[in-house]
Amino acid sequence: MKKKNIIMLMAMAVFTATTILVGCNKAVEENVSSGDPLFEGVTEASQSQGEENTEATNAQDASEENTSATESTTEPEEATDATEEVTQPDPEAPATEPAEEIIVPADADDNTVLSEAQKLFEMACDTEWKFHVGCPYKLDATQYVTNNFGWEFYLVTDSGINSVADVEQDYYKVFSESYGNDLSELYMEKNGRVYALDGARGGDIYYTGSKITEIKSRTDTEIFFTVENYYSGDDFTGEGAYTEKTEFSAVIGKDGAWRAGEFTLPY
C-alpha cells in the first residue's frame, strides 16, 4: 500500500508541474497578445533579435551570392605562349649578315685608327667563332657524311652554299685572303653539297673583354696592333684577374677596305 501511494504521489507531482508550465506559457502568450506592459520589453527584444538574425542571414547570403557570381564570371588568364614572341628566321635572308666595310683614310689620326681597329677586331672575333666553333648556316642533322675519323658533318641547307669555296667567300668578308684559312677541316663537299662539322663548345668563362691599346707598326698595306685580353681569374684555384697581350693586324686592300690579318680568338 505504501509503494502504491508513493507512486501515485509522484505521478500527481509530474502532472502538476506540467500543468503549471503549460499554464505559464499560455499566460505569457495571452499577456503578450493583450499588450501587457510587463511583457512589452520581452516582445520587442525578441523581435529585435529576430530581425538582427534575419539581417545577418541575408547579408551572409548576399556575400555568398556575390562570391559565387565573381567566381563564375572571372575567367582564368590564359598562359602566354612564349614562342609567339620569338622572331622566326627569314628563309630568304642571307646566310650571313653583310660585313661592315671599314675604310680609314691614310691621314687619319691615331685615335681614329685605334677605334676602327677595335671594330675590326670585334668583327673578327664574331666571325671566327661562328665559322670555327659553331656554324653560321642552317643545318639538317638527319643528313650527314663522315670523314676518315668517323666525325659527322651535317648538310648545309642555305641556298647558294654548295661548296667550301662558297663558305670561304663569306669568311673573307671579314678576314684577309693573304692569311689563308683552315675551313677545309671543318667543312667538306660531297655530291655538289657542302657539310659542316659544327663542333660547338663553350667560351672561356673568365674572359671579360679585349682592347686595342697601341699601334705597333704600320706599312701602306698592313697595320699591327697590340691587343690586351682581360680575364677575371679562377676562384677555385685562387688565381686572380690577369691580362694577356696578343697581336692583331689590319690588312689594307687595294680598295682601301680593312680585313683582319694576324688574329687570335681570345675566348
Image (cartoon, helix red, strand yellow):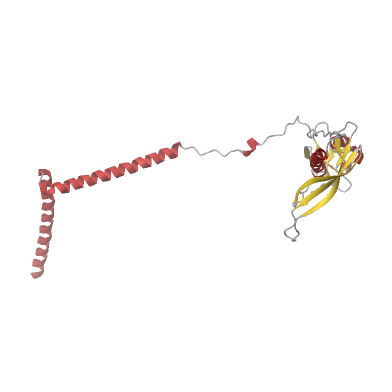
Along the line of sight, which residue is nearer the eye, 17 or 33?
33
Q: Is residue 33 left or right of residue 215?
A: left
Along the line of sight, which residue is nearer the eye, 131 or 175?
175
Residue drawn at x 9%, y 64% is 9
Furthest residue in direction top, as rendered: 92
Residue drawn at x 86%, y 47% is 247
Q: Where does the image place residue 198, in percent across and percent down from the top left?
A: 80, 43
Residue drawn at x 10%, y 47% is 37
Instruction: Answer above or below: position of 236 versus 153.
Output: below
Furthest residue in direction bottom, as rendered: 2
Along the line of sight, which residue is nearer the eye, 98 or 11?
98
Q: Where does the image place residue 108, in percent across and percent down from the top left?
A: 84, 35
Q: Where does the image place residue 62, in percent across and percent down from the top left?
A: 35, 40
Badge count: 0
Quarter placement of the N terminus: bottom left
Residue 20 in view, yes or no:
yes
Residue 26 in view, yes or no:
no
Residue drawn at x 34%, y 42% is 61
Q: Where does the image place residue 136, in percent across and percent down from the top left?
A: 79, 38
